[in-house]
Every structure is written in structure tokens, then in C-alpha cells.
Amino acid sequence: MDTKKKGGFTNSIGFVLAAAGSAVGVGNIWRFPYLAARDGGGLFLLVYLVLVLTFGSALLTTDIALGRRTGKNAWHAFGSIKPKWSFLGKLTFLVPVIIMTYYSVIGGWILKYSTVYLTGRHHQAAQDDFFTGFITSPVSPIVFMLIFLALTALVVYMGVEKGIEKFSRYVMPSLLILIIGIAIYALTLKHTDASGVTRTGLEGLKVYLIPDFKGLTFGRFLNVLLDAMSQLFFSLSVSMGIMITYGSYVKKDVDLNRSISQVEFFDTGVAFLSGMMIIPAIYVFAGTEGMTSGPSLMFVSLPKVFNSMGTAGILVGIAFFVMILFAALTSCVSILETLVATCMELFHATRKKVSCVIGLLSAAASVVICLGYNLFYFECPMPTGGKGQLLDLADYVSNSLLMPVICLLTAVFIGWVIKPSWIAEEMRIGSNGFAKEKIYSAMVRYVVPAVMVILFLQSTGLLGRLIG
Ligand code: PHE
């Protein structure tokens, strides 16, 4: 099936907004702020920014150019250049398959919180055991997941131009406006706690922006670096075939250099603004201790913060959860689209038929993940610390194990087998040149492979053992 038949983005803006829709998701609004808070605010920001401009740019360029030049999905893209490397396409396809099983479960949780806030039950959400009570209940998480998945499938069913592009065109700018609004509001907050200490939003902003180098050791710096690196992967939706798929829908007259910078800017901008809205708010109501709550920040700590804000908290809570719902939807759409587009190519079937079948299969898999909190509950020790259930396990396999391996193999493939000039040629089409060619080449040949090995060793817990 050729590129024209499978449809494509109408223009550069349509592509940038759809790609940004994939990139901007739960990772930006929830994961980035809690990592930044935990890893010393400004220090994390600085490291992350450097990584986006070097690594992020190289990884996005690789995926998007690969997609556009071959006009294929990851499954066929690698093999169409070098048949021996077709295994890499299949391995890459595994990542969205796994992520799809749990992303809609998280989407369902967000949908639940949105409805709780929209129906004025914010006090409930702020109770200690509300979140655990909800995810361990047998029916409710499944129902919300199914609704979220049905919405996602509907957008994919409508196709690239009428579904994904149109949806992202409305959703992404609205999301940006909401986030800027809440971020500004967060800076105006002021609260005096039970012990008489008053904290303000602006003080919270300082905590977020000013690097704290106190007691910084090499080991800790390495941890910050690895946190920032894994965040970058997840956040930009790279090394999982998604950007290869979206790249295959881009017309040849689009300047990829410019579009890639815009996607990076959008993604990093939303992450930065999310930190600006969450960190000062948590700081004002829960102090620096509240900032280290980690993954539970969004579902447990934030509802408490909204509750302490009084009436304004209801509105902010609604805006927040609706916004993150949009972000999660556009990301989930990109995952499902990758699965659907690949199966359309594989089975020569129509979009409508494949969307329905894959939608149903995903629903079945996500039900199993939901049941991981009750019927199939177990506690599995994770190499990265803590104990996990089915969802954490799926997340670990896709993000911590597969992604570094795929990224390493892709870098070797581009850097040493087909050579970076293959990508550079594509980057020059539709633009005045590829100014970053030298740095791109050095990144894919040397830096990316080296860092991926370190990241993989860290994810498997081997790095800790090697360093002692
Ligand atoms: N990039 C998205 C985020 O930041 C997450 C995502 C992962 C999207 C995998 C698509 C695929 O939340």
C-alpha cells in the first residue's frame, strides 16, 4: 500500500500538532514534574534541556526521517532498507503493543477523576484511600477504561486527516491555554499551615527553577542523568515506531528540520509549564516533603492540594483533569494508530475493519491489566526498586528493557550500516539543508549507543551491582 492511499497530514502544522499530540501526554504533565521535584528542580531542568537539544533531536530525526523516506511503518521500514534487519521492525512493533495494554487503563483512571471533579465530588478524591479503593475495585476501572478506549478507537477509525489531525488541531491549542492559565494561577497561591508557616507560589517557583547543588555527588548526578534520559524517551514517543508511522504520513515538501524543532519545543514547553503549575502548588500546600511523593503525585497528592484551595480548587481540579485527559487521548490515539496502520499493511485490510478488531483485542488485554489489581494481584519485586503489579511489569518491559535495546540497535543500524548520510539526504528534502548533520552523525554513531548501554544496565539493576 503506498503513502498516498493510506492518507496523510494536510500540511506541516497538521503534522506538528499530531506529533506533539503523541508526545505530550501523561509523561509531561505527571512524570516530568515529579522527577524534576525529586531530582533537585533546576538541576534536572538543565540536564533535561541539554538532552532534548542533543539526544531528543537525534532520536526524533531518526524516526521521522526513516518513516518519511521509506513511507512505511516500523514493521516494514527497516526490512525494506536491509532485509537482514527486518527483525528490528518487529521488535519495535512490540513496544506499542505492550504500551497499548496499559495506557488505556491509566486513561480510564484519568477519565474517572475528570468525572469525579465534574460532578462536584472533589472531597472524595482527596481522601486517603480513594485511589487505591478505585483501582482495586472489580468493575469501575474496567468501565472507565472501555470508554476511554472507545473514544481513542473512534478517532483512529476516522482516519489520519479527518480523525487524528482534526482532533489534534482543536485539542492541542486548548491544552496549551489551560496549562498556561493554571501555571499562572499556581504562582499566586499563598497558604499558612497548621504550624503557622506561610509559603507562597513564587517561593515554590524558586524551588523549581534554581538548581540545588548541595551534596551533589557523581552517583547522584548519574541518577539525575538517567532519570532525564528515560523521561526523554517516553516523553518524545521515540524508539517505539510511533514517530516512524507519523513520519510516513508527511509530505515531501514539509521542512522536517523545522517541524522536528517545533515538536520538541511543544513537548518541552508543556513539560516545563506542567512543572510550573504543579511544583509551586504542591510546595505551598505540602512543603518540600510533599514534592517527593513520586508516582502517586497526580492521583493522591494533587487532589489534596485542590481540596485545600477551597472553591477555586474545584475549578482548577476540573481544568487539570480535563486537560490531562486530552493529552492522554492524543497519545493513546498515536499508539493505536501505529498498531492499526501496521496491521492494515500486513493483512491488506481496511482501516475501519482493522480499527474494530484491534480495538477489541486491546480491550481484552486492558481488562487483564485492570484485573491485576484484584483478581490477578501479585507483588513482583522490580529491578528498579519497589514492588509492581501487571501494569508496572508491562511498563517496565516496554520502557526500561525494550526501548533502550531498540534505540541502541537503531543507532547502530543508522550510524554504521546505512550511515547517517541516508537520513541527512531525507532531511534536506523540502528544506534548505541539514545544519545539524555533524552533530547528528556523532550522536547516532557514538553517544547514543554508549548511553543506551548504560541505561539498559541501570534498568536491569546491573549498573548498581557493577558500580558496587
Ligand atoms: N509521549 C507520551 C507522554 O509523554 C507517552 C507515550 C508513550 C505516547 C508511548 C505514545 C506512546 O506521555
Image (tube, rainbow, N blue to C red):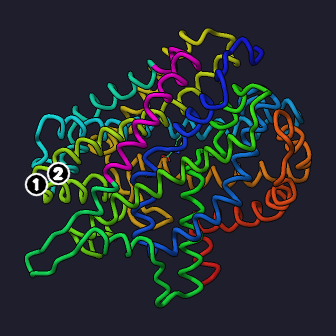
Crowdedness of circle 1 by 10 Å Cα count: few (<14), some, many (20+)?
few
Residue at image position (29%, 76%) is: 288
Q: Which residue is mark 2?
A: 313
Q: Which residues are magenta?
A: 155-182
Between 314 and 183, the one nearer to me in the picture: 183
Query: Against 209, is 142 above or below?
Result: above
Q: Position of residue 196 (x, y in %)?
A: 9, 81
Crowdedness of circle 2 by 10 Å Cα count: few (<14), some, many (20+)?
some
Q: Position of residue 104 (x, y in %)?
A: 40, 35
Residue at image position (38%, 75%) is: 206
Q: Which residue is mark 1?
A: 310
Q: Secondary structure at mark 1?
A: loop
What secondary structure characterizes most of the magenta part?
helix
- State the quadrant of the C terminus: bottom right
Asked if one can make out residue 437 in the rendered structure from this viewpoint, the answer is: yes
Amino acid on which disc 2 is placed = Gly
Residue at image position (52%, 68%) is: 45
Between 378 and 351, the one nearer to me in the picture: 351
Left or right side of 220 for 440: right
Left or right side of 15 for 44: left
Check residue 177 for magenta coloring.
Answer: yes
Asked if one can make out residue 413 in the rendered structure from this viewpoint, the answer is: no
Q: Quadrant of residue 324?
A: top left
- State the quadrant of the N terminus: top right
Q: Quadrant of residue 175?
A: top left
Q: Quadrant of residue 193?
A: bottom left
Query: Against 42, is 334 above or below?
Result: above
Amino acid on which disc 1 is placed = Gly
Q: Secondary structure at mark 2?
A: helix
- The answer to whether marks 2 and 1 mark residues whose Cβ atoms lie closer than 8 Å is yes
